[in-house]
Image (cartoon, rainbow, N blue to C red):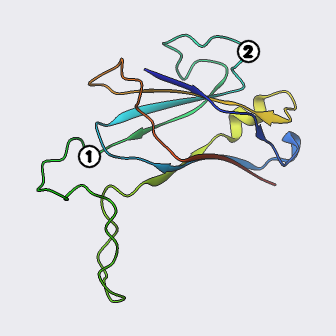
C-alpha cells in the first residue's frame, strides 16, 4: 500500500463559514492497474493503521480509479503525448491523458476543530498488488473551500 502525506494546505475560509470543501488530485495518471484511494485529514499526529477505513474519525473520502492496465497496442499506442493533427482534428484526448479527480471533503473538514491548515494523508492500494508503493501518481493536490 502506498502511504503519502501532503504539506499543510491553507484553508482560505474560516471552518464555520464553509459551505463546501473539495480536494483535487490534478494530473492523475491512469495508466497501469486500477486502484483505490482512501483520504484522511489532519491524521498526521497519529500513525494510521494499514486497515484504516471509512470508520476512522479522520476519514475524508475515497475514490476508485479504473485504469487501463498494461498496453496491448502497437508501438506508440500508449504514448499520451499526441496532439491534434490540425486545427480541425476533433478526436478526443488520448485515453492515457492525466485527469483530475475531485473529492468532496466538506464533512471531514467541518469535523476538525478550527484548523488553519489541512494536511491530507492518502492510503492507495491495488487489489492485484496490495504491496505496491507507486500506486497514486499525480502532479498537484489542491484544496478548495466555498462559502
Q: Position of residue 143 (x, y in %)?
A: 69, 46
Left or right of 42, for residue 49: left
**x and y, in percent, of residue 38 in the image:** 51, 29
Q: Regarding mark 2 in the picture, which secondary structure is present there?
A: loop
Q: Residue furthest bottom?
A: 88
- Answer left or right for 53 relative to 44: left
Mark sitting on residue 68: 1
* Corner quadrant of residue 42: top right
Nearest the eye: 16 or 96: 96
Q: Residues within 10 Å of mark 2 (few under 14, many from 20)?
A: few
Q: Position of residue 12 (x, y in %)?
A: 83, 48
Please determine whether, in this image, residue 39 is positioned above or below residue 137.
above
Which quadrant: the C terminus?
bottom right
> In the displayed structure, would residue 53 be above or below residue 137?
above
Q: Which mark is residue 5?
A: none
Residue placed at 29% from the left, 81% from the top?
Answer: 85
**Please, what secondary structure does the residue beneath circle 1 have?**
loop
Q: Residues within 10 Å of mark 1 (few under 14, many from 20)?
A: some
Residue at (33% x, 89% y) in the render? 88
Q: On the rendered image, what quadrant is the N terminus found in?
A: top left
Q: Is residue 89 above or below residue 142?
A: below
Point out the tag, 1 or 2, that comes first from the N-terminus.
Answer: 2
- Vertical placement of 101 versus 58: above or below? below
Residue at the spot 26% in from the left edge and 46% down from the top edge: 68
Residue highlighted by disc 2: 45
Q: CA distance from mark 1 to mark 2?
A: 36 Å
Q: Position of residue 118 (x, y in %)?
A: 75, 34
Amino acid at each position: 500500500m502506498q502511504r503519502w502525506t501532503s504539506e499543510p494546505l491553507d484553508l482560505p475560509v474560516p471552518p464555520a463559514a464553509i459551505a463546501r470543501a473539495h480536494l483535487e488530485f490534478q494530473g492523475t495518471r491512469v495508466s497501469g492497474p486500477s486502484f483505490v484511494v482512501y483520504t484522511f485529514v489532519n491524521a498526521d499526529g497519529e500513525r494510521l493503521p494499514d486497515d484504516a477505513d471509512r470508520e476512522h474519525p479522520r476519514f475524508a473520502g475515497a475514490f476508485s480509479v479504473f485504469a487501463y492496465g498494461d498496453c496491448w497496442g502497437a508501438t506508440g499506442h500508449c504514448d499520451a503525448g499526441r496532439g491534434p493533427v490540425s486545427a480541425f482534428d476533433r478526436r478526443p484526448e488520448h485515453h492515457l491523458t492525466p485527469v483530475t479527480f475531485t473529492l468532496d471533503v466538506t464533512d471531514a473538514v467541518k469535523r476538525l476543530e478550527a484548523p488553519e491548515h489541512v494536511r491530507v494523508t492518502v492510503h492507495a492500494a491495488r487489489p492485484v498488488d496490495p504491496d505496491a508503493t507507486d500506486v497514486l501518481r499525480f502532479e498537484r493536490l489542491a484544496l478548495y473551500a466555498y462559502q
